[in-house]
Image (spheres, rainbow, N blue to C red):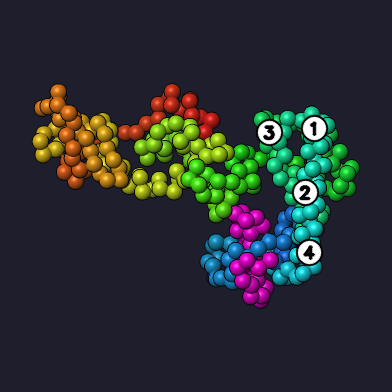
């Protein structure tokens, strides 16, 4: 077992482990650490805790110190510089007539590098822009192209549920989401219904997928052949959450489908849920 401190550098970013080096630190406290990018200031997301050796990548770097007033003042100064750098970069982008959208600017804590995050359709030749920015700021410049999901995470906003974006509040990593998940959950494959503000499939489709997969194992799917108390039939509609089924009985082909519960029927031959080629092609831009 090894004692660790978890540190985040963004509000909903990934948590990195560091050695506390004998220091007791509370969640939310600012700390100064050394990373691959240099000296950085982050927030404690996990207080002193013992974890299994298999969960860490040795050797752990140590916490340099808890942030003091001078460090916090440096953070405030960096935020002011970032706003000015954003304005200057937008002017340079317009001057160079580049088809790119600047999303965010980040100064490293020690001011050794400035990172400019942007979105664009396809590749962008920004070499002249980098030279121009380096001439203004006299430090290392890095332009990093990000996806629309990352853009939503950085900028934040409200989802169609009325709550702040999951990605900008608590999701540390993006999980893969597929059109098949939406179909298995019985959702309408309407892009406006299943996509988030970023234009990709909603991250929340992933949350309940395990539950739906469990329900699909015990619930006859549409097209399944089942044995009911009134005879054999084909499932024409189902509700995974309640277990309600509508079955077209073989011995009543002209009658309306009969209502049953999954507990009352026996599956003779189940069907499968597939995303058709046309559906896949129409919605392929929603997947990432």
Left or right: where 246 falls relative to 5: left
Cα distance between the residues tagged 3 and 2: 21 Å
Q: Which residues are magenta?
A: 5-30
Residue 98 is situated, as x and y percent measured from the top left of the image, at 77, 30
Residue 172 is situated, as x and y percent measured from the top left of the image, at 57, 53
Q: Against 231, is 105 above or below? A: below
Q: Which residue is mark 3?
A: 120
Residue 200 is situated, as x and y percent measured from the top left of the image, at 53, 37
Q: Are marks 3 and 4 in contact (CB under 8 Å)?
A: no
Residue 181 is situated, as x and y percent measured from the top left of the image, at 42, 39
Q: Are marks 4 and 1 in contact (CB under 8 Å)?
A: no
| Of marks 3 and 4, the one in the foreground | 4
Q: Against 134, is 258 above or below? A: above
Q: If you read the primary sequence from the N terminus, does the residue marked by circle 3 or circle 2 appear first?
A: 2
Cα distance between the residues tagged 3 and 4: 34 Å
Q: If you read the primary sequence from the N terminus, does the residue marked by circle 3 or circle 4 appear first?
A: 4
Q: Which residue is mark 4?
A: 73
Left or right: where 114 falls relative to 181: right
Q: Which residue is mark 1?
A: 94
Q: Residues within 10 Å of mark 2 (few under 14, many from 20)?
A: some
């Amino acid at each position: 077992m090894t004692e660790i401190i978890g540190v985040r550098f963004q509000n909903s970013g990934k948590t990195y482990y560091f050695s506390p080096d004998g220091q007791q630190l509370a969640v939310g406290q600012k700390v100064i650490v050394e990373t691959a990018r240099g000296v950085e200031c982050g927030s404690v997301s996990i207080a002193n805790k013992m974890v299994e050796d298999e969960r860490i990548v040795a050797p752990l770097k140590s916490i340099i110190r808890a942030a003091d007033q001078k460090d916090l003042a440096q953070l405030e100064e960096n935020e002011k510089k970032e706003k000015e750098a954003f304005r200057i970069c937008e002017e340079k982008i317009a001057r160079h007539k580049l088809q790119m959208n600047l999303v965010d600017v980040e100064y490293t804590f020690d001011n050794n590098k400035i990172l400019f995050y942007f979105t664009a359709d396809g590749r962008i030749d920004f070499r002249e822009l980098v030279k121009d920015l380096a001439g203004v700021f006299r430090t290392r410049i890095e332009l990093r192209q990000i996806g629309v999901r990352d853009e939503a995470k950085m900028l934040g906003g409200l989802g169609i549920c009325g709550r702040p974006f999951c990605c900008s509040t608590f999701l540390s990593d993006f999980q893969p989401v597929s059109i098949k998940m939406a179909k298995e959950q019985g959702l309408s494959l309407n892009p406006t219904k299943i996509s988030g503000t970023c234009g990709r499939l909603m991250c929340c489709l992933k949350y309940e997928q395990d539950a739906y997969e469990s329900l699909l194992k015990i619930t006859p799917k549409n097209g399944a052949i089942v044995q009911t108390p009134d005879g054999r039939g084909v499932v024409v509609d189902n509700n995974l959450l309640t277990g309600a089924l509508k079955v077209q009985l073989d011995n009543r082909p002209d009658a309306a489908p009969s209502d049953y519960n999954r507990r009352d029927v026996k599956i003779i031959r189940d069907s499968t849920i597939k995303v058709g080629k046309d559906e896949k092609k129409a919605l392929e831009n929603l997947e990432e």
